[in-house]
Amino acid sequence: MAEIKSHEFEGFLEKSARHYQLFVIYGPDRGLVSERAGLIAARTGVDLSDPFSLIKLDIGDLQKDQGRLLDEAGAIGLFGGQKLIWIRGAANEKYLVDGLQVLAQKPPEATFIIIEAGDLKKGSLLRKASEAARSIATIPCYADDARALNSLIDAELAGANLRITPAARQALLELIGGDRIASRNEVRKLALYCLNMEVIEEHHVTDIIGDASAISVDDAVDAILTGNSGTFLHAMQKITASKTSVFLVIQACLRQFQLMDAMRAEMDEKRTQASQVMQTLGRHLHFKRKPIIEQALRTWSADALARETNRLQAAILQTRRRASLEDTIAMQTLLSTTLQSGRK
């Protein structure tokens, strides 16, 4: 098994990546999955601007023609030379796993294969197959920790010849981290805002940076709870524009409904008011969000909360099974929940 941990990736890219032809990159941080796939693609030496050398496929393309992976891997390029097959949106499709297992036994000469997948659970088909094969480099991508975020900040600011104060760095760390691409875009936006300055101060961060992984998501969840479809769609536009994964919103919405379910159960069991349960189970919530959640507790019954929680869980399961439709499934589910809140 060749599993590359996050802290090992840079060293792997520099020294060992050239020894592999098959790569499976997966995880909940879609931005990081995409970024690392791009770095590996560049390391292969294949001309990524040549349509005869680079074959990009969505998992839907393989679904229509389930033998295509093996056909493409075995085909000789029109002008010879190396080629790269780059597959996006994979989950645990059996036809993909079967094809990968065949290729792992005897990797094709002069052909590289990169597979981008979503968050694969331990023991899932694709992850199990890739981890069991010595010829496949398996690269999990989880949300950046403080060390990785500090490295990202240092790299981006060094390129702009900028320094940052400790207070500004701490403020920045609290506002990024949900998605690698979103975090990088936010740091670049800060660098552009501070162009021709020498040092970034804390107020520069708070002036220009939005919380790419929390605040915008909370805005969307609050719009869902209030049943305001217009505000919800506006919040989702901001989220997609910042390259934050839509999956984070449905995940946050599920957590919110699970919390409300527990709150409602305590209200019914102890015959307390919403304002009282907010002081115990809801004490960690931001003060601006408390009135919204308190009102939602008054309008959603225990049975309705349980049904909606189950529906959100089922939708998340569908996004994992059909990764190529993740955004569509999430958006349809969240909009339906918003309309349900509006009717209540």
Image (cartoon, helix red, strand yellow):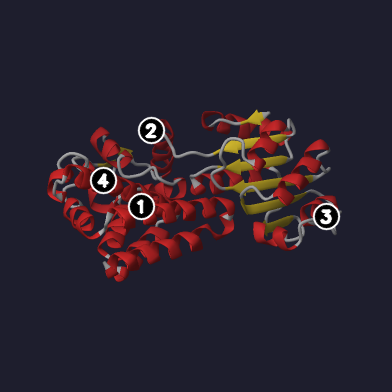
In this view, the mark in front (2 or 4) = 4
Identify the element where label 2 is drawn: helix
Identify the element where label 4 is drawn: helix
Distance, label 3 to label 1, CA atoms, is 47 Å
Tag 3–tag 1 contact (CB < 8 Å):
no
Tag 3–tag 2 contact (CB < 8 Å):
no
Q: Amino acid at mark 4?
A: Ala
Residue on which the image places disc 1:
306
Residue on which the image places disc 4:
265
Tag 2–tag 1 contact (CB < 8 Å):
no
Q: Amino acid at mark 1?
A: Ala
User: Where's the N terminus, which quadrant?
Assistant: top right
Q: Which numbered disc, 3 or 1, marks the residue that appears first in the sequence?
A: 3
Q: Amino acid at mark 3?
A: Asp
Viewer-side residue, 178 vs 80: 178
Residue 72: x %, y % from top left: 80, 55
Distance, label 2 to label 4, CA atoms, is 37 Å
Q: Which numbered disc, 1 or 4, marks the residue that appears first in the sequence?
A: 4
Residue at the location (72% across, 57% down)? 55
Distance, label 2 to label 1, CA atoms, is 36 Å
Identify the element where label 1 is drawn: helix
Q: Quadrant of residue 238?
A: bottom left
User: Where's the C terminus, which quadrant?
Assistant: bottom left
Identify the element where label 3 is drawn: helix
Q: Which numbered disc, 2 or 1, marks the residue that appears first in the sequence?
A: 2
Q: Which numbered disc, 3 or 2, marks the residue that appears first in the sequence?
A: 3
